[in-house]
Amino acid sequence: MQRPDSQNNNAPSAGRVVLSADDVTRALRRIAHEILEHNRGADDLVVLGIPTRGETLAHRLVAALAAVEDVAVPVGSLDVTMYRDDLRRQPMRAAQPTRIPECGVDDKVVVLVDDVLYSGRTVRAALDALGDIGRPRAVRLAVLVDRGHRELPIRADHVGKNLPTAHSERVHVRLFEDDGADEVRILDQEEVAGR
Amino acid sequence: MKHLLSAADLDKDQVLELLATAEQMHELQDREVKKLPTLRGRTLVNLFFEDSTRTRSSFELAGKWLSADVVNVSAKGSSVSKGESLRDTAQTVAAMGIDGLVIRHPASGAPHQVAQWVDASVVNAGDGTHEHPTQALLDAYTMRRQIGDLAGAHVVIVGDLTHSRVVRSNLILLQTLGARVTLVAPPTLMPSGVQSWSDTDGFATTYDFDEVLPTADVVMMLRVQKERMSGGFFPTPREYTVGYGLTRDRLQRMAKDAVICHPGPMNRGLEITADAADSARSLILGQVSSGVAVRMSVLYHLLGGANV
Amino acid sequence: MSDRTYLIKGADLLGTGRTDLLLEDGRIAAVGKLGDAAQAAMIEADGLVALPGLVDLHTHLREPGREDAETISSGSAAAAAGGFTAVLAMANTQPVTDTAEAAERILDLGRAAALVDVQPIGAVTKSLAGEELAELGLMARSRANVRVFSDDGRCVHDARIMRRALEYVKAFGGVISQHAQEPQLAGGSACCHEGELSGRLGLPGWPGVAEEVIVARDVMLARHTGSRVHVAHVSTAGSVEVVRWAKSQGIAVTAEVTPHHLLLTTDLLSGYDPVFKVNPPLRPQEDVDALRAALADGTIDAVATDHAPHARHDKEHAFAEAAFGMLGLEQCLQVVTTTMVQTGRMTWADVAAALSTRPARIAGLAGHGRPLAVDEPANLVLIDPSATGTIDADASQSLSRNNPWHGRTLQGRVHSTFLRGRATLLDGEVQK
């Protein structure tokens, strides 16, 4: 059981690197600035990551926000497994924890964080999940990589890197906390098949 | 996982995952909107051949909170006398195009048989004096929330073991989780062949509750029906309580952090005193509230994914 | 069916050597090296063993009452297919065979089917209720000439009734066939052997001792009354011990074992398949071993099928609620071949004794269980001991399908059966 989006690949040498560890750090720092600029400060912000790597990124983003503005933005996680529209097409997935900060989401500006934006279906599920928890004033979306191929009318507000890809390619986000190193790789069709 | 018929269907990883998912489901109960869209479009039938309001409503709520369509079918009364076989009944219900069948039956093994006759996923919601795997899951869930990892924990199960469906599922599940289990009962209420069974499976049995009480991390008391007296299983309720009841005196002799479980319904004053049932050590109310979350987890795992 | 003359060429007579047999006018007309007879149908019996026609002390034919499960006609066909020339029909029909009229009716229906001699067993007590003796004497004096009495399906548990029954049947040389099951130790809900597996499966079991205490009581009653008792379907090592002791004391006790208790064990219940629900229940391997040894050494006199057909809708219930019983007539000889002959425990002469001679004597059937010799009734069976076959429940003469042997490979094949010189089974085909 694993989330297909989590791209959990432990073969670090496969594919080519498109974002290095420094690139990841810089991207997060820039997104933090963008968020604060757009929100005119950190008031009412709540950052929710979509497990597994979105949650890791959410914590890093909150750290980046603190570095810029010296604020403790509430952070949590939002599992979307139960809201997916492709449950019946996939093998069983384990549910991940949903942790909503004590302040809740009502009337807050919720920043959803995920590692890769692709079809948009995960974000759709996240919006549904969020709607069952409360009524935010606004929801914004931050992703590390936008690889295109949207299947729903969804776009990211903050993007670490736009990465044009082919359908047959695969994007692997690896993060230190989950995978032991920070980097983003692209695997082409043959490399995907050869895994 | 297609069916959940026995606690033995689950390996340790599966149990841990079911319990982890149950935790997520449990938090849902604090929310204003308790519904998840997960099983939308799926149909679940609670096929109950004997009454059990608690188990049935628990499964019903679990199904509904996951957005499944839930139908309760009461098939009480002997199908033998009605001239319809169990197979007829099950296949008739299954012919309605359902995805899951939750079965409660007074005869051991009925859900196992039905699983061979229908395409739907079958959940055993208690069969005769055999098993009740979701009860064992919620017992384990409640224990873990209180005392943490059950590996190495000593769980003492006391009561009418012969006629209990709970004990078999608990024994299997607790051993899967690495707990050390001791069964306590008078010889007349021990399951038949328990000696060779315990030799094979590696649990302990004793007739002496007081001997094992001080080392127990969990004391699970099982219901004893007064009707058993007429079967000559024990002479009087008074004598049973003295030998095997969780009395005030025994409550005081429990280890410092030990907890008390009872899958219910309780016979206060017979196998458990009010002092014990209502004490701070008691997980009994927690067991009830965990029921829906655990059953949501089970339904999600059986019906949530593609049928492989 | 035909009244032809048959010349059986080169059959192995009870495993003692090859010979020819001429069947004429219902009798064995000649034995030895015979030339071709112009009028006779020739049966090439190279490799076949000839045994006297088999006699089943314990068959449930379900008619009258449950003709959807079996009729005397369909059960007779199953018997012929299994090599039997006589079967004793148990009394637990609806209505119960507890009167002379009921017994004669079964006799007549058997004669009309004309595939096997159907000999009714009379009930010991009225309606099998265990309270008042049935009209044992009138059944004995009837055309049906009843000599075996049994409440099978239920135990004659009242010691006083059992004593009276044993005493009473002495007047006409009757025997009581006892279903040994002490009802307080193995009550209404008991549905399998009590042991570790029943504990694990949560099924109410019945312990071997519930059989053994009745066997022990009944042999003492037989000694006290000087009468004959027959123990139906012995299933435990403990019962075997009691019977062995009783015989050593000169008590007039005989015993039978079923094919299923010779081969199947209680482990089969782990899947809750009601096909394996039978009474007495399948027991552990230790009991099976003791039963085989007892059959081989003669402590157990006979193999009897306890053929118990049931309609699907009586079997496809939860295990505890399903009907007791399994089919037995068609595979009995194969099971005995597999468990006893192939393993070297019994010779073909032993098989003839256990499946023909002794059961015929116990039942008082003068025309059956006779030697294969000149002028004897031409009741015999030809079997091919080297053939093996996988059993298919659907390929059965019985109206029911509760066949525990389905899918199993058993040794031997029943080739032909002759009832008073008429073929009831020819090369595997029932001759209706």
Image: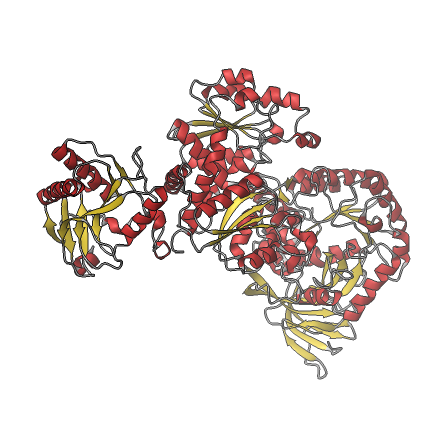
Q: Position of residue B171 (x, y in %)?
A: 48, 35
Examine the rendering and report whether any part of residue C303 can be seen: no
Q: Quadrant of residue A193?
A: bottom left
Q: How many marks?
A: 0
Residue drawn 18% across and 55% down? A147
Between B29 and C264, the residue placed more toward the observer is: B29
Q: Position of residue B68 (x, y in %)?
A: 46, 51
Q: Is residue C98 above or below residue B231?
A: below
> Horizontally, is B305 left or right of C72 in the view?
left
Q: Position of residue C280 (x, y in %)?
A: 67, 47
Residue drawn 70% across and 64% down? C79
- For the rendered model, the colour scheme is secondary structure
Examine the rendering and report whether any part of residue B36 can be seen: yes
> Horizontally, is B23 left or right of C379 in the view?
left
Return the residue found at the far bottom: C38
Q: Position of residue C98 (x, y in %)?
A: 84, 54
Between A113 and C312, the residue placed more toward the observer is: A113
Q: Is residue B186 above or below residue A64?
A: above
Between C313 and C363, the residue placed more toward the observer is: C313
Rendered-image quadrant of the N terminus of chain C? bottom right
Rendered-image quadrant of the C terminus of chain C? bottom right
